[in-house]
Amino acid sequence: RHDYERQLGIWGRRHPSAVGSFIHTNVERLSQGLPLWWKSLLHDYAEACREVAQGIRQRPMKAGLYLSLLAGAVSCSLRNPSEASFDSSLLEASGTLLLLSPWTRNSSSEKHTQRLMVLRNRGQLRVQNLAFFSLLYEAPYDAGADLYQAHCKYLKPRWTDFPSLVLDVGFWGRWWVLHSRMQNSDINNEEFQYLPGHLKTISFNDLHSETNEKLFDEKYKAVILTEEQIQEADGSASFSQDKFL
């Protein structure tokens, strides 16, 4: 290659007019062909847009369905939760449980949160982004572990074991398993395990009494006294003053 470039340089020094004509010809070809290339490219894009508009007019229902699917896919991709959002949700759940008394914490919420915190401290949590949703799964070792078991491909978990390692699913800006486990986190179901069966379930009518609601609303009403009540109150007040005097 170096010999070819050296010979080409020697030939160019010996024949400068040929080199100049060669450069001039190539520049002229580029100046003539580049506008044509851009013109053909714009023409192709214009034809494609025209065909798309014609297809939308001919089949509006199908076009609306495709546009809805595209908009939904873009929205899901933009709101796909990341690993940082899971850390934030986990710390928020742990803080919520810490504010509760140990006697009122939901055991299911506490066990799930504690397990996730232990795996997080060990570095065994992994988040796989799948464009439209994310999966949180448990890894056997920390990412920085330099053990033989961590690098041997024959000892790594198989793909058939992956569903059992999934801990949470992130979709539309929320981690759904953690969110469901934190529902009723301030209700300790173990407190009611020794109650009779008819007392373990509470209906809607038991929690929302019409009479209690009316009494609750009446306490915010202004107190209106009649003339007789005012005179009776003034009379009792004057009698008390005379008694002390």
Image (cartoon, grey):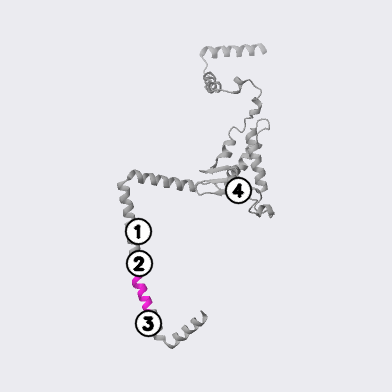
Dot 1: few (<14), some (14–19), or many (≥20) neighbours within 10 Å? few
Q: Is 206 on the left-hand or right-hand side of 65? A: right
Residue under numbered circle 4: 158
The reply to whether discs 1 and 4 touch (Cβ–Cβ < 8 Å) is no
Residue 102: image location, x then y, percent = 68, 32
Amino acid identity at mark 4: Arg
The reply to whether discs 2 and 3 touch (Cβ–Cβ < 8 Å) is no
Q: Is 174 on the left-hand or right-hand side of 150? A: left
Residue 191, picture quadrant = top right
Dot 4: few (<14), some (14–19), or many (≥20) neighbours within 10 Å? few
Residue under numbered circle 1: 45
How far, Cα to Cα, is label 1 from label 2? 13 Å
The mark nearer the N terminus, 2 or 3, is: 3
User: Residue, x 54% and y 44% (percent of image)?
Assistant: 170
Dot 3: few (<14), some (14–19), or many (≥20) neighbours within 10 Å? few
The mark nearer the N terminus, 1 or 4, is: 1
Amino acid identity at mark 1: Tyr
Which stretch is magenta? 24-37
How far, Cα to Cα, is label 2 from label 4? 52 Å
